[in-house]
Amino acid sequence: MSVEKNMLCEGVVEALGSNGEGIIKCGGTTAFVPFCMVGERVRFKILKVTDGGKIAYGKAEEISGPAAGRTEPPCPLFVKCGGCDLQHMDYSAQLAFKRELVENTLKKLGGIYVAVNGVVPSENIFRYRNKLALPIGLDGDGNTVLGFYARRSHRIVPADDCLIQSAWIKDIIAAVKKYADVCGLTGYDGETRRGDLRQIAVREIKGKFIMALVAARRVDVSFLISELEKSFKDFTFLLNVNGSTSNVIFSKEWHICRGEGRFEAEEGGIFYSAGAETFVQVNDGVRTKLYNRVLEEADEGATAVDLYSGTGLLTAMLAKKCGRAFGVEIVKEAALCADELKIRNGLQGKMFNVCGKVEEKLGEVLKAADGKKIVVCDPPRKGMERQVCERLGSCGADKIILISCNPATLARDLKIILEGGYKINSVTPFDMFPQTRHVETLVVLRRKDG
């Protein structure tokens, strides 16, 4: 039987895909249907057919025989908004899915057969995000809206709240809406490239807030700041003027409108300075668990090499634990922040920051890190360059620790490293992002002759 767009089909979910969607066989077609669970019988509508009819994407119309782990999604925007994938699963089912996702991805994409540990859970499964990036645009009638993008779309789903964000999101949205209305400003239209307000970004660091409004032109933000002061006390406010036609959130034009533009923060005994563009993991509790696990693997007296080190927070922790650490980071601004962090924490002579591409600097850093060493890699979602993986496979470090937010690129990179002189000691997922398909994974490798 061949399937066509808009056709109604029915079948039983045999497995879950990498995005958490149900996989259903319909004749010779494999259909991917979101918000289903294994064992459920689903009646669904075909929305798209690809690969000569072998692959289809559908929308569930009716589910019979609900799975034991199914629960009622608490968010009214679930299935409309593209932010969450798993609210229809109870938390134990979400953790089971993520463990199997990591294990199956390593097997299928890397040929790596390893028992994956249970997922380290998040204490908060809602209201856990310390970071907000909210687009501001127009609806079909030309009205200004704030919300989140629909799945696989740049269409904004209007929202007044988000259950995985901290509760302060409601005050942020209300203030920006009132500001736009009273001051006669409009959301930005990505197609016509017209409008005033593009995005509001907020980060909370232990009760302090860094807020940034992105606008297509220089606008007066005094009314918005006065509205925010009704709900927030300890915050700094920045205006970013981004008149480009690209989808990049921030431009290089910054204006500090309240406060100093940055905040001092502390993590694991390390003091650092954070701004609007500083990378910090979005889930405070799970970040602490993840970093503590890395430090447990870092031996005192060893030299640590921290690749893709950002602003140097983990590098500093490793320097403090091991006694000596090198950080390698390509972004100049981040490397400069790491140098400031080193001085602020009295780590001169223990912490060494190198600015450049990891693939170009790795050799000289490994040479400088003589003696017993441990390598920590926390690359972006796209993973590492092949030559980096090949060099790590023969680097001779006692341990290599990989931190990854993408099981697919982790499998690819890990396969190359294992072809060198290493074996897997443990694979542990961390649930940094409850209610979503995303998962952070920590892999510890040891030398085969170790």
Image: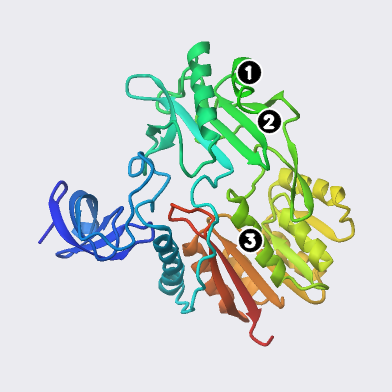
> Mark 3 packing: few (<14 Cα in 10 Å), some, or many (20+)?
some
Residue denoted by label 2: 235
- Who's the residue at 46% across and 42% down the image? 163
Give the label on residue 289, or none.
3
Label whose residue precedes the other's in the sequence (2 or 1): 1
Residue denoted by label 1: 226
Label whose residue precedes the other's in the sequence (3 or 1): 1
Q: Amino acid under label 3? A: Lys
Q: Is residue 130 visible?
A: yes
Q: Quadrant of residue 20?
A: bottom left
Q: Is residue 325 visible?
A: no
Q: Is residue 124 above or below residue 233?
A: below
Could you say where residue 208 lies in the image, as x and y percent from the top left?
68, 36
303, 43: nearer the viewer: 43
Q: Are marks 2 and 1 in contact (CB under 8 Å)?
A: no
Q: Are marks 3 and 2 in contact (CB under 8 Å)?
A: no
Q: Amino acid under label 2? A: Phe
Left or right, 143 with reference to 376 = left
Q: Amino acid under label 1? A: Ser
State the SS at label 1.
helix
Left or right, 435 with reference to 249 = left
Could you say where residue 405 lies in the image, as x and y percent from the top left?
53, 58
Give the label on residue 323, or none.
none
Q: Quadrant of residue 36?
A: bottom left
> Mark 2 packing: few (<14 Cα in 10 Å), some, or many (20+)?
many
Task: Report the quarter where the C terminus lies.
Answer: bottom right
Q: Is residue 297 above or below residue 269?
A: below
Give the residue at the far left of this rendering. 1
Could you say where residue 397 lies in the image, as x and y percent from the top left?
72, 76
Label whose residue precedes the other's in the sequence (3 or 2): 2
Q: CA distance from mark 3 to mark 1?
A: 37 Å
Q: Are marks 3 and 1 in contact (CB under 8 Å)?
A: no
